[in-house]
Structure formats: C-alpha cells, structure tokens
Amino acid sequence: MSESSVRITEIFYSLQGESRTAGLPTVFVRLTGCPLRCQYCDSEYAFFGGERMSLDEICAKVASYQPRFVCVTGGEPLAQKPCSELLTALCDQGYEVSLETSGALSLKGIDPRVVKVMDLKTPDSGEVERNLYENVALLDSKDQVKFVICSRQDYDWARFKLSEYSLADKVGEVLFSPSYGQIDLKELANWIVEDNLPVRFQFQLHKLLWGDQPGY
C-alpha cells in the first residue's frame, strides 16, 4: 500500500481525442496544477483546487472502469513529484499508460513502460522559452512529440525543430495539431502535404464531439 498522494482535478472515462490512440476508450487522470500559461490552454480549470487522493485510491477508481488505456494529464502532471510513482503504479496494473506533458519539466526517472506524449511549445503558445530540450534525448520509439500550431510562423518553427532534432527518426510519432479556433484545419493539412513532412496531422477529436466541455 502506497502512502503517497497527489491532488486530482478529475478522473473520467472517455474517448482519447489525440495522439496515436485517438478514438480508443481511455481513463483520464487529470492532476491539478501547472507552471505554464499557454495562451490556448483548454484546461485552466485544472490550475487550482482539486482533491487530494492516495495512489491506492486513484488506482481503485481507475480499475472501476476496467480500461485498457490510461492517460495521466493535467495541468502539468509532473509538477507533482509523486506523479512518477503514480505512473509506475498504473503500469503495474497492466494498463497501457501514457503521460501528457508540456516538455517543460524533466522526464528523468519516468517508468520506461510509459508512453510519453511531450509537447514542444511553439512561439505563439507564449511559452516557447520553457522548452526543456534535454528531454528529447529521453524519448524513444514508443513516444510522441506534439506541436500545437497557431500560425504559419509556428508551422515553420516546428518544421525546423523536426529537422534539427531528427524527431521523425527518434520517436514513434510526431504530431502537428492545429490550435482549436486559431488556424484553419485544411490550411495546416495542405502545408504538411506540400512539404511532405513525416508527421501525423491530428485534430482534437473530443472538441469535434463535445466542444469545449470539461471532462471529455
């Protein structure tokens, strides 16, 4: 029995809206708190508050849904130190566990079974200076790097970083995602096709289905 605890905003069961497992039923464990303030953030409600839960309580709640996939997200989940222990506990239950992280905090010590979905913050995010590029070396072929694209400037910057760090050879998926309501989906799709980029275009499936409602 673990005595560790973290502050939780919500635990819910829905369809994964992004990443390699988009469309698959997934339990989301949303931790409270984030040191970043990206201008397009859609989870500001997770910055404060929440309920402190032990890791055992979290694992029991997750198990009640009988999931195959579990996504630990935020906020920025790594802002709470016991997050790493939580990730290991969930992996030990046999789930495929993913971590959604801003890329601003170190990935050192994360259980190697965890699929890391790491952002690289673009200039228009307002938080580009927070990127911790040392994290790239800690990624492997099961992991994913996500760029949220707000403009043509962001696209060109992301294309440069894609090449600079040889990301397509480093990780399993590089994701180019249009910022919801800020850039035309077809425009970004056309840029990717025209440049023949080795990336996956994705949009937020949950926004298409449920709009901006929290908890989906």
Image: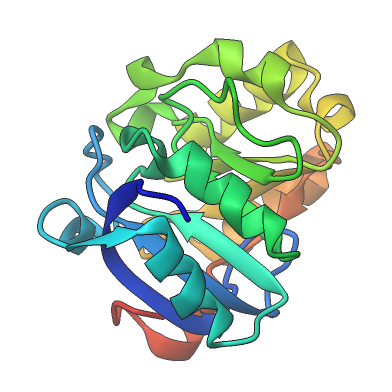
Query: Is residue 189 something that shows in the picture?
Result: no
Q: Does any portion of residue 200 appear in the rendered image?
A: yes
Pick the residue in front: 152 or 20.
Answer: 20
The quadrant holding residue 16 is bottom right
Nearest the viewer among 119 and 50 is: 50
* Position of residue 106 measured from the top left corner of the image (x, y, whole percent): 49, 20
Displayed quadrant of residue 151 = top left
Say whether residue 189 is left or right of residue 53. right
Q: Quadrant of residue 107?
A: top right
Residue at x-position 27% and y-position 30%: 126
Q: Is residue 139 above or below residue 134?
A: below
On the image, the x and y values in percent for residue 190 come to 71, 54
Q: Residue at x 38, y 74 (%)?
A: 11
Left or right position of 22 against 179: right
Q: Position of residue 25 (x, y in %)?
A: 65, 83
Vertical comparison of 111 with 177: above or below: above
In the rendered view, would you say 57 is above or below 33?
below
